[in-house]
Each structure stands twice: as C-alpha cells, then as structure tokens.
Image (spheres, grey):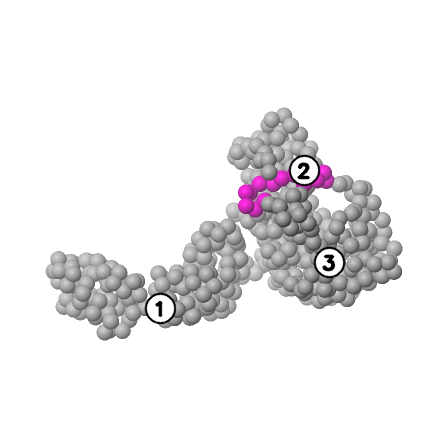
Amino acid sequence: MTLQAVLDYDEAIAKYDPVLGLEVHVELGTATKMFCGCPTGFGAEPNSQVCPTCLGLPGSLPVVNEKAVESAIRIGLALNCEIAQWCRFSRKNYFYPDMPKNFQISQYDEPICFNGWIDIEVEGRTFRIGIERAHMEEDTGKSTHVGGATGRIHGADYSLVDYNRAGIPLIEIVTKPIVGAGELAPLVAKAYVAELRDLLRALGVSEARMELGQLRCDANVSLMPKGASEFGTRSETKNVNSLRSVERAVRYEISRQAAVLESGGKVVQETRHWHEDSGVTTSGRSKEQAEDYRYFPEPDLVPVAPSREWVEQLRQTLPEMPRARRRRLQAEWGLSDKEMQALVGAGALDVVAATVEAGSPPDQARKWWLGELARRANEQGVDVDELPITPAQVARIVELVAEGKLNDKLARQVIEGVLAGEGDPDTVVEKRDLRIVSDSGALTKAVEEAIAANPDIAEKVRGGKIAAAGALVGAVMKATRGQADAARARELILQRLGVQG
C-alpha cells in the first residue's frame, strides 16, 4: 500500500474550507427481507436464508415489505422530512458478485422522504444538518476474500459470496452539503452519525450496530480554498463502520486532499477504502455518476402511495427524540452543559443511562464509564460502548463498592476480569479473592504489624499528629494487597494508639 502525502491538519484548515456529504445506510430490523419472505436473522449458515426472489432467479417477482415502508416513513418524520404522496422503485444497474440480479432495487428520483433536517451539538455549537433524502432499497450480499494481506479482492486466493444479506431492507439517508464546520468538520461528521444512530434506536427500527454492518457511513469530503464559493472535487470513503473511524477518515481526507492541492495536483473523484489499522484511505474506483447506473423504473413493483391519514398515525408513534432525552437526563442528573457534552462526546450517554436504569447512582455510573472504562476503550482503539462489559455489570460493581465489599482499586481489578471474559463481577471477585478485608481479626493483625514496623510514625500519631496515621493505613493496605477497609483500618490504628480521631 503506497501512502500519500498529507498536510498538517491545522495548516489544511487554515487554507481550505471542508465540505461534507454523508450517506448512511441503515439495515432495518424487519423479520423478513424487503421484497420476499426470507428471514433476516444475523449469523445463519451462509446462503441458507435465500429464495428465488432474493437470488434474482428468472420468473420470480418482488413484493414490497409493508413494515419496511412504515419504518421508512417514521424515520423520515423523525428527520423532519416531507413524506412523498407517491413514489416508486427503480433498478440501479451495475455488476458485482454480491448483486445476484446484477441490479439493485432502489429509489432514484422519487424518494419516499425528502427535504428534512436534524440538529446536532458539537463543542457548544449547534449545527443544522440538512437531509436531502431518505430512500428505500435492498442490501447486497457479502463477499469474503480469502488469502492475501488486506482482506480485499486484490491479492486474494479466492472469494466466497453469502447471499443471506441480499434483499435485507435498507434505508439510505443522504445529507445536503455540510458547509461552515471548519476545523470541527470531523467531529460534526461523527456527531451526526451518532445522533442518527441514537434516533434509529429510539424509533426501534434498527439496532444500528455499526460493528455488525447494520449502520454504514459513506463520507464524502471536498475542499475549497478560503473565500471560494465553488465546491471542490469530492472523494467518497465507503463503508466506515464506527463513530471513531468516521471522525478519523474525514480528518485524514482533509489532510490528504489539502496535500494534493498544495502540490499543484487535482483531487480525483473516486471511492476510497478506509484502513482502520493504519488510519489512512486508499483509492478504490472512479465514482460513477447517476447516469452510469442506467436507472429505470422497476416494472415489477407498483408505486408506493402512503395516505396522509397513515402518515399522521405514524407520526403519533414517534418516541422521545434523542436531543430531548439528553435535556431531560441532564436535568434529572443535575449535570452542567459541559458535563453532558463530555458524556455525549465520549459516546457514553446510552451506557450510562442503562447503568442508572440498572440501579447505579448517576454520578457513579458517569465516574466509571468516563474514567476507567473510557481509558480502556481508548487503549483498545474502540468506542466505549463496544467494550465487553454490560451496564448491568457496571451497576453491580458500583453496588459492591457501595456495600463496602470493594474499594475503587479492587473495583478496577474486577472490571479488568470482566473485560478479560472471566465472568460477571461476583464471579471475578470470588475467582480473584478480591473482597475487602474488614473483619476485626485479620485487620487487627495487619494493624499491629504496621505499628510494630513503623514505631517512629506511631509515636508521631500518639503525639497528636493524626495525619501521620495515613502512612500506617498505607502499610496496612500494602500488607493486605489493597483489600483492607481503609476507614476501618484507620479506626483500629487510632484505637490501638489510644488517640481520638
């Protein structure tokens, strides 16, 4: 892989204004596929959830999934879109091994939802992201390239195709050009995708798990010189599948394109691949224009014409939107704007809320997710909600600390064990023997040994320097491998030395 030159990000932003366009593909959580009755469950044996229709066999006819249409309308309403009174499907023609029909049933010039918006907040600023369209289509199959170093088709020994995913309902949500974000452009892209993910989950139309491909982002980036009004040539980084990667990919593309322009070159309109390990994008293929796909109306499907009554009925089913939920939780938890922004920026709001629902006080839930767990997520290069620990498990750790069975040091070891797959918190405590030593017998022995080993410090405490008892408590903690109840140990030390605390 040949690496391209990049310009320092701050220098790139000083000379160019980035323009973003984000296309997000969402797999809907319907029980059956978009145009047939095949199940959509994840993880089935390859090519076991297929039929003549989703395999594109001659003579098979598609039928629209009503639940998918309903989900599309609810998504559009939540995005403040207009809902079409009449729309239809088209055939998008292109050849690829995971396209069993050699065309994709999609919507072209007549999307079901259009002209909407959603507000996001980044570092105290509100950005209104315009929604160009949200349209229905079907997913493709999945190709697996075996052999080679990159997992891509080039250099692979052979390829396998699984058509289980072919035909799963998709909604593609396309933004209008996002301008004016400046240096915050990568964070705006990340915040938008996060807001969209939260909205989809609130609607119950998709689990939107990026690591499973249920939500995928194509990030379009172009640059224009400061003061210019004409957009530059864009690149499209395909299938970015984590919030962290969305931010990194946009940041990299800004630096890469700026370097191309500064050297006198021209940015090529193309698709690009994001490489999570190296943090760079590489060239994919030249980007087709709409006419290259030879769109034409799908002759086997009737138009979709949702009645206004149905649309209004669906509007009444919309839940509390993520932004309103954040404001409510901020008030309930007594957080400042800065504290809530930190929570959202870390991608921890949902896990903290779930931890609180599982019984943890809000301040303790925030403490662990934004502290120890955020640190471990950063070390592993994953989002905090991708860690293999559940909110219920964190709530149990908080409970054990509150009961005096763990202190913070021991709790961190319990977290380590849960993340390592050693079991739930109680199991890790038993396996690692991590409970606090609080019984008088064991503590008294440790206290007496600490006093005997530190007579000078003991004498200072007897002389009225109570603060010096901290050193003796430290000795007890060391002797008990951090498992002593520090408060109880201090109490016993002062009693033993005949001093009132």
Segment colored magenta: 275-287
Can residue 113 be seen by looking at this rendering?
no
Instruction: Give the labeled residue for mark 2.
Output: 234
| Mark 1 closeness class: few <14, some 14–19, many ≥20 residues within 10 Å | few
Q: Secondary structure at mark 1?
A: loop
* Residue positioned 56% across, 46% down in the render: 276
Image quadrant in which you'd find residue 136: bottom right
Residue 436 falls within the magenta-colored stretch = no
| Mark 3 closeness class: few <14, some 14–19, many ≥20 residues within 10 Å | many
| Main secondary structure of the magenta stretch | strand
Q: Give left or right: position of 115 versus 494.
A: right
Instruction: Give the labeled residue for mark 3.
Output: 163
Q: Position of residue 501 (x, y in %)?
A: 20, 65
Q: Position of residue 16 (x, y in %)?
A: 60, 33
Q: Give left or right: position of 286 versus 375.
A: right
Give the amino acid at mark 2: Arg
Give the amino acid at mark 1: Asp
Q: CA distance from mark 3 to mark 1?
A: 49 Å
Q: Secondary structure at mark 2?
A: loop
Q: Earlier in the sequence, mark 3 or mark 1?
A: 3
* Residue positioned 65% across, 57% down in the render: 214
Q: Is mark 1 in CB contact (under 8 Å) with mark 2?
A: no
Can residue 485 be seen by looking at this rendering?
yes
Question: In the image, which is nearer the foreground, mark 3 or mark 2?
Answer: 3
Q: Is residue 366 above or below residue 290?
A: below
Q: Is residue 296 above or below residue 68?
A: above
The disc placed on residue 433 is 1
173 or 243: nearer the eye? Answer: 243
Give the amino acid at mark 3: Tyr
